[in-house]
Image (spheres, grey):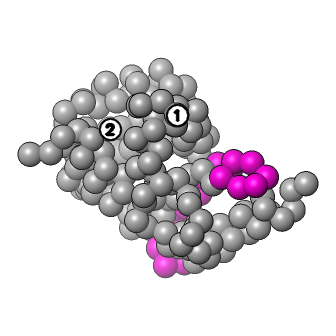
Amino acid sequence: SFSYLELCRLMMVLSDNWATNLLIQALGMENINARAEQLGLEHFEINRMMMDFTAVKENRENYITAMDMAVLLHHIYELRHTIYGHEMWNILGRQQFRDILPFHWGEDVIFHHKTGSLDCVEHDAGIIETMNGDFCFVLLISHLCNDKAKQLGAQMGLIMKEFVEDALP
């Protein structure tokens, strides 16, 4: 058996769909959607479990916009010095998949982020702390071959990081 915290770690750090589904089942889609609404996520919806291809065929999809993702990350960022937020912030900082936005940054650059991948879908969203301030990057790519999307995302990540570190006053 796993604690909810252990399931959260598996879900966030390893993108474990089994852990995600257990959490969705335990919390309930209605409760998750209600909490998202309370947080101000305007277009967020959980309508199915992960990898539920029957639900996909029935057009029951999960949705999040780039702005909703930024709002959610900002919420965690704002709470990072509290007991609740500190653990979530640390979990985001241990993300194991660094093949999109932080690909060209080097292993020493900490990026508190979450990735997501499906067929022809690649997402990466997180917060980077720099000498010029802290910045939220959200990249949602769909309808593009995964390999191409990752390459494009890695190039965009390099440009974004260089901009916030070098171009800003």
Which of the pair 6/126 is nearer the observer? 6
CA separation in Å, label 2 and label 1 = 32 Å
How far from the left and from the top, in percent, is residue 127?
A: 60, 50
Q: Residue at x 30, y 25 (%)?
A: 30
User: Residue under circle 2?
Assistant: 47
Task: Check disc 2 and report its element: helix, strand or loop.
Answer: loop
Task: Check disc 1 and report its element: helix, strand or loop.
Answer: loop
Q: Amino acid at mark 1?
A: His
Q: Is residue 163 left or right of residue 140?
A: right
Which is in the foreground here, disc 2 or disc 1? 1
How far from the left and from the top, in percent, is residue 96?
A: 40, 65
Part of the protein shown in magenta: 129-148
Q: Is residue 24 left or right of residue 132?
A: left
The quadrant in which the N terminus is found is top left
Q: Residue at x 52, y 34 (%)?
A: 81
Q: What is the quadrant of residue 117 in the picture?
A: bottom left
User: Residue under circle 1?
Assistant: 81
Q: Earlier in the sequence, mark 2 or mark 1?
A: 2
